Each structure stands twice: as C-alpha cells, then as structure tokens.
Image (cartoon, helix red, strand yellow):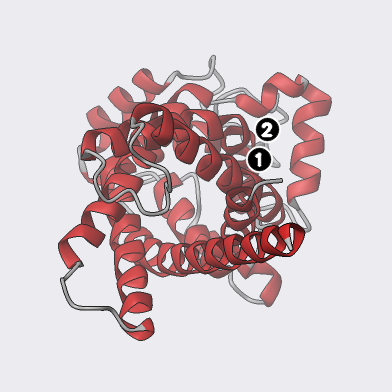
Amino acid sequence: MSADFWAGYISGAIGIIIGNPLDLIKVRLQASGPAETSVSHRQLARFDNATSLVRGAAAPILGYGALNALLFVSYNRSLMLLDSSVTDPTNPQNSALYKLWLAGALGGIASWTVSSPTEFIKCRAQLDSRPRVSSWTVAKDIVQNHGWRGLYFAGGVTCARDSIGYGFYFWSYEYCKTLMSSNEEETAGSAALKVLLCGGIAGIVTWASVFPLDMIKTRLQASTIETPAEARPLLQSSTGSQRQGAFAMARHVYQTEGLKPFYRGLGVCSLRAFIVNAAQWATYEWLMKYFQGHLLSQSLQDIA
C-alpha cells in the first residue's frame, strides 16, 4: 500500500492512544443534561483504574487508524485532482486555501464510512455504566439487534461534522505553516516545532468549527443506551418515544438548556485536540519522509 496510507494509519492509532482519556471526559460532559443527567456525576468521576481510562479505545485504535489512513489518502488524491500544480500533497505551497478546504472535506466524506460506526461504538462503550462493557460487546450488541445498518446510527450528522471539520483541519494546518514560514533555512528542531504547533492549532480550529454538531451526535448516540430499569430496544430513545433526528435533538436541547450545552466540554476537547494532533501530524510527517526516502533508495538500487 501507499506511504500515506501507512503513515496515516499509524499516526491515527497513536493519536487515539494519547487522547482517549480526555476524549472520555469530553463525551461524558456532552451527554450530560441539565438537572436529570443522562450521565451521572458518579459516572463522570469513574476513573478508578487503568481500564477506565481506555474504555472504548479498542474500536477507535483499529477504526481510527483505518479512518486516518483513508482520510489522508483521500485528501492527497483529491488535492492533486483539484490542483494539477500539486505534485507533493505533503507540501502544497502554492495551492489555494479553498482547494485545501475542499480536498479536506472530500477526505472527511470518504472517511465517514469508517468514522460513523467507530464513533457510535466508542460513544456507547464510554457512556455505558454496565460493568465490563467493551467496544466488542457493544458492536456485537448493535449488529445482533439491528444488523450492520445499526452501526450507522446518527450517520448524517457524523458525515456533516467530518466533512466540515476535516475541511478546516487541512486548511488551518497548511495556513498556519504558511504564516510561520520564513526565508531563513530551518533547522531540524525548528521544523519539528512548527509541525507540532501547526498540528495542535489545526486540531483546535477543527473542533471549534464543528463542536455543536459533535454534541448533537453524542446526544443522539447516548440516547440509545439501555438502563437497568428499562428493557427498551437498543436504538430507542431514552424518552421511550421514537428516536429523535439531529434537527429535533438540536431544537430540544436549545429550548430546554439554551446554548451552553452546545459547547460543554470544548475546553477539555481543545486541550486533547492540541496534544493529539500535534503528535499525529509530527508522526505523519516523519513517517512520510521515512517511507518516501526508503522508496527512493529502493528505486535507486533497482536502477543500479
């Protein structure tokens, strides 16, 4: 497979391992309601062992690695189609910013096929209060009760979040690199620092642009969790009525809680986004240089 596939896969898996504890807090804050919370204070504080910190991480480590690989491959190919002057997508110096955004949005739509089921499994595993609930038991639960289509619950809002978010992701990363570039020759240390800073900033910009959509997605997915007191179907809402759509959920939250819940957890998410994406971009860029250098040396050996 291509260098950008493996660089994307490995960097995505590393990002999940680093960021899962903070992501767990973010999801629980988003799912909590005003007075009667869907996630109790006891559940929010339940980090009593190492297992709690990685709850729901198995599906993202496998899924997000594949998602990130698909995202970067789709972005790179889309950018080269949109801008014929780009020969190296890892360094699109002269490409227009709107083309970077469009390529990122197309990459987000392509990666949705993986992100939608991965997010649903992760969210349910992180919020489910039953003991010994893992990503695997949640996935098995969904498929057994609702088939493979059940994995794409709240898929529409997830797709919108991914396309918009990843558009800003690549746009902000390349724009930040442009602002930080100088005519002086960069040292290895300054180049690495630039990648870390730009990657971290790109992560914050991305989540700030789509956080209300992510909150709606989390609320929709949280509403499918069964409680011990109720033996309701997996994909039935917590109110006992037909499950809500994204627009109905957004309207209900705004009418009952105002604007605040749409940004609840953004601080934790921004901290996580900076750390994860700084590490992710640094890993991706290093691996791309390594793979490209390895392929080049192989080609030279074949010619010789």
* Cα–Cα gap, marks 1 and 2: 5 Å
Specify few, some or many for label 1: CA neighbours under 10 Å numbering under 14, 14-19, or 20 or more: few
Residue at 48% of width from left, 64% of height from top? 285
Asked whether residue 216 is in view, the answer is no
Residue at 32 percent of width and 61 percent of height? 270
Say above or below: 286 vs 125: below
Given residues 274 and 101, the one toward you in this image is: 101
* Disc sitting over residue 230 in the figure: 2
Q: Disc 1, disc 2: CB below 8 Å?
A: yes
- Quarter of the image with the C terminus in it: bottom right
Q: Is residue 114 left or right of residue 272?
A: right
- Residue 167 lies, in percent from the top left, at 33, 38
Give the residue at x 67% y 77%: 49
Residue on which the image places disc 1: 227
Question: Which quadrant would residue 293 be assigned to in this image?
Answer: bottom right
Tell me where residue 210 sits by quadrant: top left
Tag 1, which secondary structure?
Answer: loop
Q: Tell me if 244 is positioned left or right of 258 in this view.
A: right
Give the x, y percent position of residue 31.
Answer: 45, 45
Amino acid type of the residue that numbered disc 2 sits on in the rendered structure: Glu
Image coordinates of residue 243 in percent, x first then y, are 53, 19
